[in-house]
Image (cartoon, coloured by chain):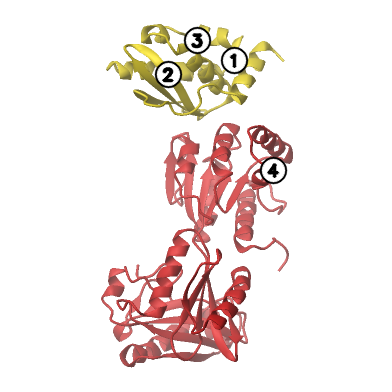
Chain colours: A red, B yellow
Amino acid sequence: MAMSSNGLIDRRDPQLAEESAVVLATLVSATGSTSKKVGAKMIVGQSGRLLGGVTIGGCVDAQVIEAADALVANGGRRLLSISLDDDEAWEIGLTCGGTVNVMLDRAEPARAGDALVSAHAFAADLLAQGNAAVVVTPVEGAQAALVVSDTDARSGSLGTTALDDAAALLAVDVLRQGARVETIDDRQYFFDRLAPQTTLVIVGAGQIAMSLTRFARELEMHTIVVDGRERYATRERFPDADELRVGMPSEIVASIAPTKGVAVTLVAHDYKYELPILRRLLREPVGYIGMLGSKKRGAAMRDMLRDEGFTDDELARIHTPIGLDLGGKSAAEVALSILAEVVSIRSGKLGTRA
Amino acid sequence: MTAFRTAVLEHFRHPRNRGPVDNATVSIDGANPLCGDRIRIQLRIERDAIAAAGFTADACALCTAAASVLTEHVRGMTTGEATALDAAWINSALGGEPPHGREKCAQLPLDTLRRAVASSSGVHE
């Protein structure tokens, strides 16, 4: 695939290496509609060649390809405004017609000094480490790019230190709220929020786990089902799981790089797996630890671990009872509540009514 | 609480010899496929004597306690003496018999230890 699901230009991709220039098209704003698709991207190569499996969608793609073709040949960057009627808007997931603005940014994957390509490389590394990133680019005018991570790491520049500082401040809010256009010194910039793919580690290959893998696939999470019992963790039971791993569960979990993009769900309801895993995880920077069980059971487990030297702050990382309280009882409903909590934690938002 | 339960909980909460053995000469994994207990027994065998024994386990309290008392007891034994230990010895060490249906939990460390010794001496069961 020429680009990740985040739509980043990856200069290591052989398909991109064949292109002397590409255009990254990013939907930066939509008027007259909800802005659900802001941040949607596609990469267009020479002769309108589409690179990667991601497109903005509907009738927008054709107009973007046409405009991108000219930029690939002649250079430059531009903002493309496209008016949509109601039917066309539905095609790309907007609720009603209006105007969408697509930023077209020409990049040269093989050129070391290309600001956009360098920014994407930096962002890709951040995502691989489980960090979120904001890529800031001017909506129009000369190419520039600044990347700000959720750990305050920075790369690139918008031109001046003052501009970069102002953008970094706004990026903090973008990390929480999502991609959008912001104005700094009368100039518009697009703040693109990139989040790492969530790796959902599911310990205990029971019925809840089966529902978790089904739903997580829809949410584009990478799922790893872990169990000590071979007859449970089978491909027949888990056709949607990305990985099935059987062995000593605590060692399997410990072998997964503990980044913020990792969510560990303990759904075996069995202390023999939970305690060894928690001992290994509570001091690791995983993004989420949830454990099936009642408040009473959770308190008993915390007491045991506290006796072993874990602090209250460390123990407070265990989400138990697991999931948001949606009132459901079935395995599928519990799985839904778990994923709702994982998404909520990842987004930094409480699960309240929209 | 019975002496058996007290001993099991004490060894589960404060297991002896939990963790890898330095310079182990043999390491064998064991599992109860139905309940999912998983254990690894590691030994350092020097001149047919067990110089060190340890275990790693994602296992229930009973299995963990059995591994704890077993690894504590076999240190210094010859491999022959260690493999001669049986379920009755485990029960005696823990002060009672496991509840009905849980015998395999207590037996797993012993079986794994025997396989470790056999593996070390080139005899494979």
Which sits in the foreground, A96 or A246? A246
Badge 2 crowding class, 10 Å Cα cut-off, few under 14, some 14 to 19, many 20 or more, is many
Residue B125: in sight, yes or no? no
| Distance Cα–Cα, label 1 vs label 2 | 32 Å
Direction from residue B52 to residue A316 in the image, left or right: right
Identify the residue under disc 2. Answer: B52
| Residue located beneath label 3 in the image | B87
Label drawn at residue B100: 1
A258 vs A171, left or right, is left
Say if A319 sits above or below A298 in the image. Answer: below
**Mark 2 chain:** B
Does dot 3 land on a helix, a strand or a loop?
Answer: helix
Labels 1 and 2 share a subunit:
yes
Comparing marks 4 and 1, which lies closer to the viewer? 4
Dot 4 and dot 1 within a common chain: no
Residue under pointer 4: A312
Residue kind at label 2, given as amino acid type: Ala
| Same chain check for tags 3 and 4 | no
Name the residue rendered at 60%, 92% in the picture: A186
Q: Of marks 3 and 2, which one's residue comes earlier in the chain?
A: 2
Question: Within 10 Å of the Cα at label 1, are there few (<14), some (14-19), or many (20+) other Cα atoms?
Answer: few
Q: Are marks 2 and 4 on the same chain?
A: no
